[in-house]
Amino acid sequence: MEQEPIFRAMLKDRVKRNRKVANRLGRLCMSWSHLELDLTLLLHRLMRISDPTVNNTILGVMGLREKIQALHTIGFKRAPSPDWYASLSKVLNMIDNELRPERNRMIHDFWITDIDGDLQRSRLNPRVVNTQSRAKAVQLSVNAKITPELMSLLCQNIETASVAINLMSHDLNAKPFQDTARAKNPAQNQSKDQN
């Protein structure tokens, strides 16, 4: 084990050089956790299941993407207004299509330092790619140069989405639920109610 001190020194140096990024990754994890909690609480409010065992079982087995899908559907059904649902849908799409994939890359990719000492996020992604017309090559990984500022911006965007979800949840207190699916065509709904 004569190599162990060398590897420990390398690890210590790596940690020291990446301290700013490590701090921002911690903030990213906390911000994402808060956003997931806010989405879960909004879904809880919209589902209106009074039995805590049933409610927590349903919410506990759902992954984030399933919760987002449920929020789209139940949010449409129980929106206090069409504008409220439009805002919800916009935020949910941003979370699912932009923030979630970028957060996953930040958390699950490898972090490496290039020859110039710049930090890069790297993901093994072996595949054949087109390099020029009719020319192909093997690409082994995808690398992206990442700065602490880019990570801070992602955290800010996640926190902004969390604020938007909280505001929508708060709006549910101010406005009664309505069945927006039924509200769109009252004449059709009257005939259903009379049957």
Image (cartoon, rainbow, N blue to C red):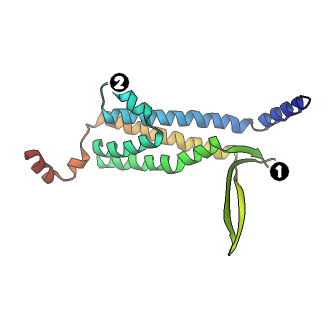
Camera-side residue of 164 and 22? 22
Against 125, residue 17 (above or below) is above
Name the residue type under label 1: Asp
| Crowding at mark 2 (Cα within 10 Å: few <14, some 14-19, many 20+) | few
Q: Please provide percent x and percent y for residue 179.
A: 24, 43
Q: Please provide percent x and percent y for residue 20.
A: 72, 37
Against 129, residue 166 (above or below) is above
Residue drawn at 67 percent across, 59 percent down: 127
Q: Which mark is residue 79?
A: none
Q: Please provide percent x and percent y for residue 124.
A: 69, 50
| Front label number (1 vs 2) | 2
State the separation of the CA atoms marked 1 and 2.
55 Å
Q: Looking at the image, tell me whether mark 1 or mark 2 is earlier in sequence order.
A: 2
Name the residue type under label 2: Pro
Element type at mark 1: loop
Residue drawn at 62 percent across, 46 percent down: 105
Where is mark 2, residue-wise? 52
| Crowding at mark 1 (Cα within 10 Å: few <14, some 14-19, many 20+) | few
Q: Which mark is residue 116?
A: 1
